[in-house]
Image: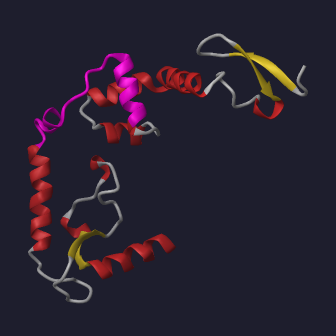
Amino acid sequence: MKKNGKTFTCKNCGKEYYVPKHRFETTIACSDECNRKARIKIIIQEKGDKISQLYQEGNSIRDVAFLCNTNNRTVVKVLNIMGTPIRTISQSLEGKPKVVRGVRETHRTVLARGCCEKCGSKDKLEIHHIDGHGSNYPYKLRNENIENLMLICHGCHLLEENVRRQK
């Protein structure tokens, strides 16, 4: 008999297994494979309907993962298990060209400024989101207003990002 432990039943396969005392709160399965399967089942129970609904409303997998506090791979697994058909890229872009075109036109307008708004350089120009809500945010949460965009060189952009991280 092992010390300070307990025997649990695997929530995935039903097999009994030993767990040391310090792992009582976190254990749900007998092996890594069963653990992955059991965690997916738990996510489906807790968030499956929300994930499916958000995806069917037209959100991208990346946006659904962000809104449901999970990762892209888990969202795809949940959608496959629930039988929700996954859109191709061309299907995802159907009906959305106006939004994409609008952003491109806004970016072209900013690029037409021609030089860094900080130092005046004309080399390695980049678009900077003043509020920080740029390409690292899901599409619907980005702030693409022309007042929020600056044309700055790569060096000034690095400085801006470092200042933001230090705040």
Residue 59: x and y in percent read: 27, 36
Is residue 3 something that shows in the picture?
Answer: yes
Q: Is residue 94 magenta?
A: yes
Q: Which residues are magenta?
A: 73-96
Is residue 167 something that shows in the picture?
Answer: no
Q: Which residue: 30% across, 60% down? A: 134
For residue 44, side relative to residue 136 (left or right): right
Residue 140: x and y in percent read: 28, 47
Q: Which residue: 9% across, 44% down? A: 97
Q: Residue furthest front?
A: 1
Q: Is residue 15 magenta?
A: no
Residue 137: x and y in percent read: 34, 53
Q: Which residue: 56% across, 21% down? A: 38
Q: Foreground residue, 27 or 167?
A: 27
Q: Which residue: 14% across, 71% down? A: 110
Q: Which colour scheme appears in the figure? A: secondary structure
Q: Quadrant of residue 5?
A: top right
Q: In the rendered view, tell whether residue 92 sits above or below residue 33.
A: below
